[in-house]
Amino acid sequence: MKRAFDGKYYDVVIDKIAYCSYDIKYAMDALAFGKYIYMSTTPVYDPKHFDTKESDFDGIHQTWKWCGRFDAPYEEIKRQAECALWQEYADKNWLAVRYPFAAGRDDYTQRLRFYVEHVMKEMPMYIDNINDPMGFIRSDEAGAFLAYLVDQEANGAVNGSASGTISMREVLAYVEGKTGKKAVLADDGEAAPYNGEPAYSINTEKAERLGFCFSQLRDWIFELIAIT
């Protein structure tokens, strides 16, 4: 990175690949920039809950350390990455954008597709949070918000999420209604990808104060499920 970026200056850097505090250090040591936008994640909140706000995790008063990508679970290394920004690079102009699960036609993780396929094929699945509402962001909107922040006078953390929530029971019911198939729920079924998520919603008032209006989740999630 130092060789690649030596002698270059960027008005804005959007970093979508940093996971851990060492990744932040490598970027900061190699890049000269006016603004750094880091794509963080809502799992930094411990735990997420209804109306989760940016102040629920500030990264300033947390114990932190330099760490690599495989030194701790995903949510912890992402916390450490933010802690590095908050504590080691407080003098830099940066934003940490916190997203919940992204969903869209281009979702390579196919997590939402898991639920659809298992209903359609009537394959057993294990879901430990079937009634818990959770938040999502549409993948194209996630990119649009990062681009929007380029021209905004803001720093620190900012949440991004579609407005509203949905539970996996609602997702299954929609698929059942469209296909005539029945979801097979079993303790020994294949573990669902959104397992372990608590009931939560993401507060986006800070983004709205910056002038960005997120879509309503229920305006697009069912159409996405239908084409998934």
Image (spheres, rainbow, N blue to C red):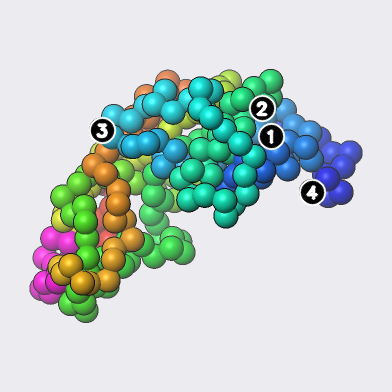
**Mark 2 neighbour class, 10 Å CA radius: few under 14, some 14 to 19, many 20 or more:** some
Label 2 belongs to which residue?
88
Numbered range of the magenta stretch: 172-184
Point out the frontmost of discs 2 and 4: 2
**How far, Cα to Cα, is label 2 from label 3?**
30 Å
Please, what is the three-letter code of the amino acid marked with disc 2? Glu
Q: Is residue 88 left or right of residue 174?
A: right
Q: Earlier in the sequence, mark 2 or mark 3?
A: 3
Q: Is residue 69 above or below residue 90?
A: below
Residue 155 vs residue 60, the one in the foreground:
60
Q: Which three-letter amino acid code belongs to the residue tagged 3?
A: Phe
- C-alpha distance separating marks 2 and 1: 20 Å
- The residue that disc 3 covers is 50
Residue pictured at 86% horizontal, 49% vertical: 3
Instruction: Measure how far apart labels 3 and 4 are at the Cα level.
Output: 40 Å
| Residue 142 x %, y % | 47, 44
Which one is in front, 97 or 163? 97
Q: Is residue 215 visible to the viewer in this orientation of the structure?
A: no
Specify which label sits upstream in the sequence, 3 or 4: 4
Q: Earlier in the sequence, mark 2 or mark 4?
A: 4
Q: Earlier in the sequence, mark 4 or mark 1?
A: 4
Q: Earlier in the sequence, mark 2 or mark 1?
A: 1
Contact between labelled residues 1 and 4, with CB atoms less than 8 Å apart:
no
Q: Secondary structure at mark 3?
A: loop
Question: Is 225 above or below relative to 42?
Answer: below
